Image (cartoon, helix red, strand yellow):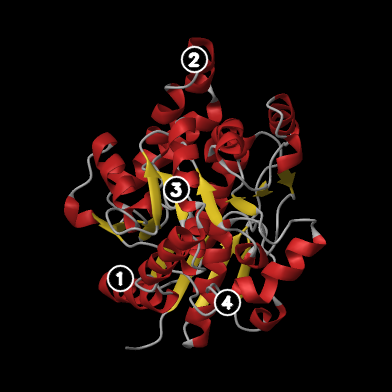
């Protein structure tokens, strides 16, 4: 298999984003294998070891309104891509100049449907006429139904089914490839490496039950449901309870909610983390009652770390767990009673360890090596 010249497109690097951490790993693996990797982005933080290997192309865009950033990035990235010839143009963004599109952000029309179910009629109208959403939907249609796109790569069956429900996409043009995780980095020994001293540093008792929430965009990730379940949990548990929230977002609303429910002292908002790895050594149960998530990388990282997971059926990563243990899947992201019951079931040491072992076993099937090999097979299939 000869080395390839591959162009990647991603608008911005967010050091706290799961998608960016995932892309960073993928780029690293491809560079190690000797492929010529180009990255087209408006802003990206390149590590020192990759500076001499990764060919970075800064893409300009108009600042200000979000829809202008979206449209101008699509325009300027297309202009820059057309200056060179690549074996594969692989985009993580909705731009009209790609061969392969990774639908990592899901189907926007589907997300708007999920969102509309929980909006007032007035907010629904505002959303419909919002120029950002109109622009995304226009670009999305171009990609999904346009002749330029050779293949759409989905990170879950959830996303594939939604794309085909809203757009005219043949089975031959769309495929599912679940994300991968670094199994050497995320593993059960994180508890021994980080758990004891970090609990001590943050005033968490050795016997306390710690629920770990990792995700930015607290509303969509279901933080409200988690906090609402806390009074129910405190009544059931005979031990101290701590919730650790890692992620980027406005916390005032959620702090006020926890305080009003008498659980303010149980929730620790620690902000975004460039590397959340140590926290997977602290948490006993990973909880993400998301309203919609194409595939939560943090969920897979928790499984690899041997932490049982509680999430919802609208998290694409839940497909890994279905019928196989490793945690529980909620039917509704608003089911506080179901969430409390799931946490209570996993709160016992024996049950939690058993489900944690299952979690790790499930993650072993989703190594980053596997993902890179399957991605390269796709590249070779569609290359020019």
Residue identifier under label 4: 189
How crowded pointer 3 is (Cα within 10 Å; few <14, some 14-19, many 20+) is rated as some
Image quadrant occupied by the C terminus? bottom left
Residue identifier under label 3:
345
Q: Which mark is residue 378?
A: 1
Q: CA distance from mark 2 to mark 4?
A: 50 Å
Q: Quadrant of residue 329?
A: top left
Quarter placement of the N terminus: bottom left
Residue 79 appears in the rendering: no
Q: Nearer the viewer, mark 4 or mark 1?
A: 4
Of the image marks 3 and 1, the number of the one nearer the N terminus:
3
Tell me if residue 351 can be seen: yes
Gap between marks 3 and 2 measured at Cα: 42 Å
**Residue placed most toward the observer, 236 or 151:** 236
Residue drawn at point x = 47 percent, y = 83 percent: 35
Q: Residues within 10 Å of mark 1 (few under 14, many from 20)?
A: some
* Number of the front mark, 3 or 4: 3
Q: Identify the residue shown where x is 59% and y is 34%.
A: 235
CA distance for labels 4 and 1: 34 Å
Tell me, yes or no, whether the two marked residues, 4 and 1, touch with CB atoms within 8 Å. no
SS for dot 3: helix
Q: Which residue lies under the disc numbered 2?
A: 125
Name the spot of residue 205 as percent of width and height, x first: 73, 57
On screen, residue 224 versus residue 292, left or right, reads right
């Amino acid at each position: 298999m000869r080395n390839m010249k591959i162009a990647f497109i991603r608008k911005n690097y967010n050091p706290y984003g799961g998608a960016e951490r995932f892309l960073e790993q993928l780029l690293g693996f491809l560079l190690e294998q000797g492929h010529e990797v180009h990255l087209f982005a408006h802003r990206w933080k390149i590590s020192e070891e990759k500076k001499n290997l990764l060919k970075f192309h800064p893409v300009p865009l108009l600042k200000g309104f979000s829809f202008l950033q979206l449209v101008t990035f699509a325009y300027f990235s297309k202009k820059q891509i057309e200056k060179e010839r690549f074996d594969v143009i692989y985009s993580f963004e909705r731009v009209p100049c790609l061969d392969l599109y990774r639908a990592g952000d899901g189907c926007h029309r589907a997300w708007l449907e999920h969102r509309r179910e929980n909006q007032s009629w007035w907010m629904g109208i505002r959303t419909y006429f919002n120029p950002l959403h109109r622009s995304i939907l226009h670009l999305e249609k171009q990609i999904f139904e346009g002749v330029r796109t050779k293949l759409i790569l989905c990170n879950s069956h959830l996303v594939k089914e939604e794309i085909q429900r809203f757009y005219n996409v043949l089975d031959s043009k769309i495929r599912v490839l679940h994300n991968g995780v670094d199994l050497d980095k995320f593993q059960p020994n994180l508890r021994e490496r980080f758990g004891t001293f970090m609990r001590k540093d943050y005033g968490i008792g050795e016997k306390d039950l710690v629920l770990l929430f990792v995700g930015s965009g607290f509303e969509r990730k279901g933080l409200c449901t988690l906090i609402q379940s806390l009074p129910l949990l405190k009544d059931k548990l005979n031990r101290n309870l701590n919730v650790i929230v890692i992620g980027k977002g406005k916390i005032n609303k959620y702090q006020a909610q926890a305080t009003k429910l008498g659980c303010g002292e149980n929730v620790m908002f620690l902000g975004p983390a460039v590397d959340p790895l140590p926290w997977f050594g602290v948490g006993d149960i990973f909880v993400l009652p998301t309203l919609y998530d194409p595939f939560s990388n943090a969920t897979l990282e928790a499984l690899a770390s041997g932490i049982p997971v509680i999430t919802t059926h609208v998290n694409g990563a839940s497909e890994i767990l279905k019928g196989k243990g490793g945690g529980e899947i909620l039917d509704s992201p608003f089911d506080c009673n179901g969430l409390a019951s799931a946490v209570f079931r996993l709160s016992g040491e024996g049950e939690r360890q058993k489900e944690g072992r299952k979690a790790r076993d499930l993650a072993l099937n989703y190594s980053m090596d596997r993902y890179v090999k399957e991605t390269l097979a796709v590249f070779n299939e569609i290359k020019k």
